[in-house]
Amino acid sequence: MGVQPARATSASGTPEAGHGGHAGVPLRRVTPRDLKIGTAVAGGGHHLEQDYPDPFTYDKPYRRVLAREFDSASPENQMKWEFIHPERNRYNFGPADAIVRFARRHGQAVRGHTLLWHSQNPAWLAEGQFSKAELRTILRQHIFTVVGRYRGQIHQWDVANEIFNENGEYRQENIWIRELGPGIVADAFRWAHQADPRAQLFLNDYGVEWPGAKVDAYEALAKQLLADRVPLHGFASQAHLSMRYGAPDQLRAVLQRFDDLGLYTAITELDVRMDLPASGVPTAEQLTTQAQYYKTVLDACLAVDDCNSFTLWGFTDKYSWVPVFFPTEGAATVMWDDFAKKPAYSTLQQTLAAARHNGR
Ligand code: XIL
């Protein structure tokens, strides 16, 4: 899909990570003990249209960095409906199982993503002609089957993903909400909790890095769910950022509103994309700005008591979804194609190390 931008590596003439006192120490070794540093695990989705095999199962250097740097893993696509439930009466657990096994072997938590979403649903579901009662049963069975399979092995589930529009109204593209009404969100949380009582259950969205109607809608929903004793445990900001829109300097305040409700908070899909120069290679100044954005998000999480999970949406530009979905933008992750570290990586590392040192 689309034209690939020039592939930048550390040999492209751009600066590499600086060398502080922790140079060479993996992120997971400097992260405060009450915080998990995570990444998406590349596979499925846009990768299927690229000229490389499945990154997670084929790319050994990629797997080594994944194991070394992170203590949480999020299947990028492998637990989404279209992958894990491709036909009505058939589940495809192989790819998700492989990630859960890998995570266990490397002492990593897993973030389950996702159970109730408008996007990446299989055709049999999206185009099926089901009664309301059938749809409800389909969702319930899916949640019990998928969450139940990984019972005890998932740290956090993104139960409901992107359920509000920017104006704070429920998304009518969401088949569950459209057909069954917004009350289905509470049911999804209840079913997920029954299937795995230990998993922390999250609301997750983008565009919640600044206050506004969307954040207000989530706050109102969270309050209502908690008042109704629905097992909601967390609120997450995806944090897909673009340098076009400025650094998310109000993110801390947003997260604090949910922390104040007694919820965990998390950053679940952080990347920071930029407009690439004609060369395809970011300037030193762009890389510095990018590092500042990453730090702003990390500082927000560190400043909020129960922000317990900080996940990057991939760690290398080699497999980033950004150039495929945002043509002309790219270079959004903390490592080049060859896994060499960008300034954003060292900034995260130094900020984490300082926080751990100071007992956050
Ligand atoms: C993206 C994946 O990175 C791509 O591989 C896929 O083609 C499309 O979805 N919000 C989410 C993620 O919750 O699941 C999306 O992931 C990015 C936006």
Image (cartoon, rainbow, N blue to C red):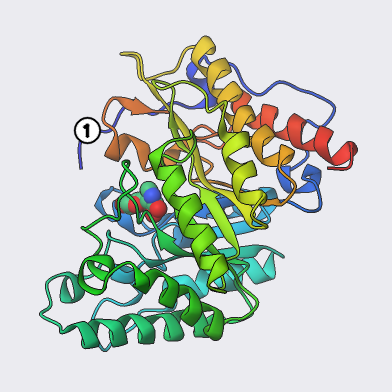
Residue at x 17% of width, y 76% of height = 124
Q: Which residue is drawn at 53% across and 28% down?
A: 248
Q: In the drawing, does residue 266 fall left or right of residue 355?
A: left
Position of the N terminus, as image quadrant, is top left
**Label 1 CB-ligand 1 distance < 8 A:** no
Image position, residue 49 (x, y; %): 24, 51
Residue projecting furthest to the right = 358
| Image coords of residue 36 (percent x, y) | 69, 53
Q: In which quarter of the image is residue 171?
A: bottom left
The correct choice, above or below, for 122 with respect to 297 in the image is below
Do we see residue 180 in this rendering? yes
Image coordinates for residue 62, horizontal then vertical, percent? 54, 50
Q: Can residue 47 be seen in this view?
A: no
Q: Which of 282 and 177 is in front in this view?
A: 177
Q: What element carries label 1?
A: loop
**Residue nearest the observer in this picture, 36 or 200:** 200
Indicate whether 311 appears above or below 117: above
Q: Which amino acid does label 1 sit on?
A: Val
**Is 222 left or right of 357, judged from the image as shown?**
left
82 horizontally vs 115: left or right: left
Above/below status of 95 relative to 202: below
- Label 1 crowd (10 A; few <14 / some 14-19 / many >=20): few
Quarter of the image with the C terminus is top right
- The residue beneath circle 1 is 3
**Where does the image place residue 261, in percent across and percent down from the top left?**
64, 55
Picture mark count: 1
Residue at 63% x, 35% y is 252
